[in-house]
Structure formats: structure tokens, C-alpha cells
Amino acid sequence: MASAKNKVIAGDYENKQVALSGGKAIIMLGMFKNITLDKSTVEAYEVVDETSRKSASSAVCRAAVGGLLLGPIGLAAGLSAKSKGTHTVAIQFKDGCRSLLEVDDKIYKAIVTKVF
């Protein structure tokens, strides 16, 4: 499964990148123009879809190290890889614009904490 695109996938600002800047999620419109996703710009947001996946390479590496160091118990513990999430979020801006974003866990967390 591919990682999150971190971009606007539909609506206003389509195909613009979404990034973190100073702990805040932003939509990058141009070289020096951004929209900060916080209480001042966002009227409402809704999580449309959320998927998680296990990092297979991380699980294999951790299992190998765990197996070498701790035997079968370490092998089992190493297989519990961290989940990586992709979130699809609908944003309603205060100016009437609307966007559908696909973002990773870090950007999603920044949106939720700054808009709440």
C-alpha cells in the first residue's frame, strides 16, 4: 500500500501539497503563499476515511533482531510493527471553499489539534 499523498485530492486547491510548518498543517499555494489549517481558516472538518497498514520491512527487521537477542519471544515481539495511517479529511473553510485532503498521521494530528 502506498503512503499518504499529503495533498489536496479534490475540490478547491486540488493538487496542492499539504505540509507541516512550525507544527501547523498548511496548504502550499505558491512560493510564499500558504493557507494555515487552524481555527482562523477552517470552519469544520470531517474524517472521510482512515486506513492503517503495518510496515512490513520494519516488522522483519525488528523480528530478526528480537529473535537474535531474545529467542522466540523476541521474534514475536518484533513482528508487532507500528501502524502507518492515511487519512482522508474533508475541510470546509470559513471563506466557503472546500477541499478533500489525503494526509499522513503527522499532518492529520496537526490539523485536529489546531482546529479543535
Image (cartoon, grey):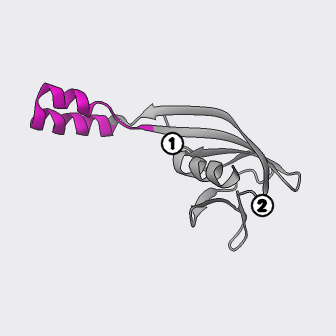
Tell me where residue 63 sits by quadrant.
top left
Across and down, in percent, residue 36 comes to 70, 62
Across and down, in percent, residue 16 comes to 69, 56
Q: Residue 53 vs residue 25: left or right? A: left
* Residue displayed at 55% across by 44% down: 4
Disc 2 residue type (three-letter) = Ser
Q: Residue 30 vs residue 52: left or right? A: right
Is 64 in the magenta? yes
The residue that label 2 is drawn on is: 40
* Residue displayed at 75% across by 57% down: 39
Across and down, in percent, residue 46 comes to 72, 38
Instruction: Magenta stretch: give its range.
Output: 57-83
Q: Which mark is residue 3?
A: 1
Across and down, in percent, residue 104 comes to 55, 46
Q: Residue 76 vs residue 25: left or right? A: left
Q: How would you rate the neighbour count of disc 1 (Cα within 10 Å): few for under 14, some for 14-19, many for 20 or more? A: few
Outermost residue, front side = 116
